[in-house]
């Protein structure tokens, strides 16, 4: 009888400790019942803890905003390849995930927090950790993120504390990739140039039109993209993305616009110019998946749909990372033939 009581008490203690550990890693998104998002300081504290709980992550500052907030980068590598040179030497694909370039569109932050917890704390996603190097920017527009209100994005269904679209200097970072007026963008471009990521995710929320899709995508595969990479997107990545995300219950659609801004004239896709993330990355011969969840869907649905997209992109790199790296290098080498020894364009 006594031993049975002891076993029961030990089981209860283990269960209590397990529940405590689980609750200790809950995000503010989860604690709020999936309706709110973490503040800048809460996010920074969470990512710091993630970096401290494992030897496979390094958390650093890549820049400072006009209001003095650090712009952070978390590098996750099973090989501890925490520099661009070490990452290149590993031969593994590097996946860059950008969250909060428009900080009222912040699903990516909460999605990656949960994804990273599952991978680094819970021991899940082992094949992703083994085969992919992750670069995660938790919040890009850090000043805009802290200008939070429930009314910053009209008609958007959460979170309760939405950030502002532009920076403290009223600059739209996703119009700044080529002109680089914002100090935040100059820090990002320096990091991108150093790391040369093989694949990029830029997480957003739509504006405007109402439709049934929870998540839409923008992918360059037109004349602004190297033909071999455009073919890779069209024939390989896009079918893989749609199949995996939709099989998990999230309907997908291309991110489209209206002809002449009139719905009755039909829908269109377009080649993005380099002031946008996906257009800029296309000019650098890199696939950039623009994730646009639907603003009128509940925040909970948008976060979990984004999380599935993140997992799917990483899974694709597990299966096809070597091919992606090879096609990227082919496109890079094709451009190099038009450059002189001084790095300038040949005339």
Image: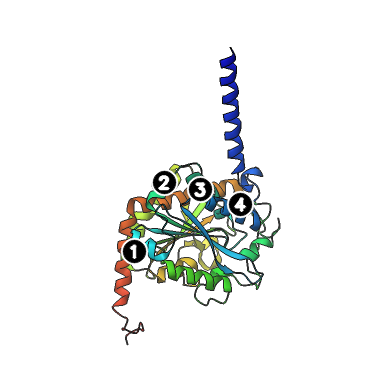
Residue 6 left/right relative to 320: right
Q: Position of residue 331 (x, y in %)?
A: 32, 69
Q: Which residue is mark 1?
A: 229
Q: Residues within 10 Å of mark 3 (few under 14, many from 20)?
A: many
Q: Earlier in the sequence, mark 1 or mark 4?
A: 1
Viewer-proximal residue among 155 and 7: 7
Residue 290 left/right relative to 5: left
Distance from disc 3 to disc 1, alpha carbons, whole Å, reads: 28 Å
Q: Image height check: is 169 above or below 19? A: below
Q: Is residue 294 visible?
A: no
| Quadrant the C terminus occupies | bottom left
Viewer-proximal residue among 221 and 101: 101
Q: Which residue is mark 2?
A: 244
Q: Which residue is mark 4?
A: 296
Distance from disc 4 to disc 2, alpha carbons, whole Å, reads: 23 Å
Coloration mode: rainbow
Q: Which residue is mark 3?
A: 115
Q: Nearer the viewer, mark 3 or mark 1?
A: 3
Look at 71% across and 58% down and name the residue there.
149
Q: Residues within 10 Å of mark 1 (few under 14, many from 20)?
A: many
Element class at badge 1: helix
Which quadrant of the figure has residue 330? Answer: bottom left
Q: Is residue 188 visible?
A: yes
């Amino acid at each position: 009888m006594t031993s049975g009581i002891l076993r029961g008490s030990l089981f209860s203690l283990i269960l209590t400790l397990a529940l405590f550990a689980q609750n200790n890693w809950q995000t503010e998104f989860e604690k709020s019942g999936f309706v709110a998002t973490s503040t800048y300081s809460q996010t920074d504290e969470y990512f710091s803890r993630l970096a401290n709980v494992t030897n496979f992550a390094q958390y650093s500052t890549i820049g400072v905003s006009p209001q003095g907030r650090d712009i952070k980068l978390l590098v996750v590598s099973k090989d501890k390849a925490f520099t661009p040179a070490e990452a290149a030497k590993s031969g593994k694909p590097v996946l860059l995930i950008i969250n909060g370039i428009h900080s009222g569109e912040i699903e990516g932050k909460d999605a990656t927090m949960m994804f990273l917890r599952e991978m680094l704390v819970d021991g899940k996603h082992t094949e992703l950790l083994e085969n992919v190097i992750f670069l995660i920017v938790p919040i890009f527009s850090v000043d805009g993120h802290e200008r939070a209100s429930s009314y910053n994005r009209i008609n958007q269904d959460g979170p309760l504390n939405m950030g502002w679209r532009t920076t403290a200097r009223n600059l739209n970072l996703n119009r700044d990739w080529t002109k680089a007026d914002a100090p935040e963008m100059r820090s990002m471009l320096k990091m991108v140039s150093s790391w040369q990521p093989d694949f990029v995710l830029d997480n957003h929320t739509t504006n405007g039109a109402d439709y049934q899709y929870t998540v839409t995508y923008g992918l360059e595969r037109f004349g602004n993209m190297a033909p071999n990479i455009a073919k890779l997107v069209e024939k390989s990545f896009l079918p893989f993305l749609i199949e995996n995300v939709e099989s998990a219950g999230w309907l997908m659609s291309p991110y489209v616009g209206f002809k002449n801004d009139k719905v009755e004239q039909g829908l269109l896709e377009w080649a993005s110019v380099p002031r946008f993330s996906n257009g800029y990355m296309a000019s650098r011969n890199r696939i950039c998946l623009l994730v646009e969840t639907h603003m009128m869907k509940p925040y909970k649905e948008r976060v979990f749909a984004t999380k599935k997209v993140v997992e799917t992109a990483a899974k694709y790199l597990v299966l096809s990372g070597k091919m992606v790296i090879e096609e990227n290098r082919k496109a890079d080498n094709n451009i190099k033939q038009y450059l002189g020894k001084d790095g300038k364009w040949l005339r």
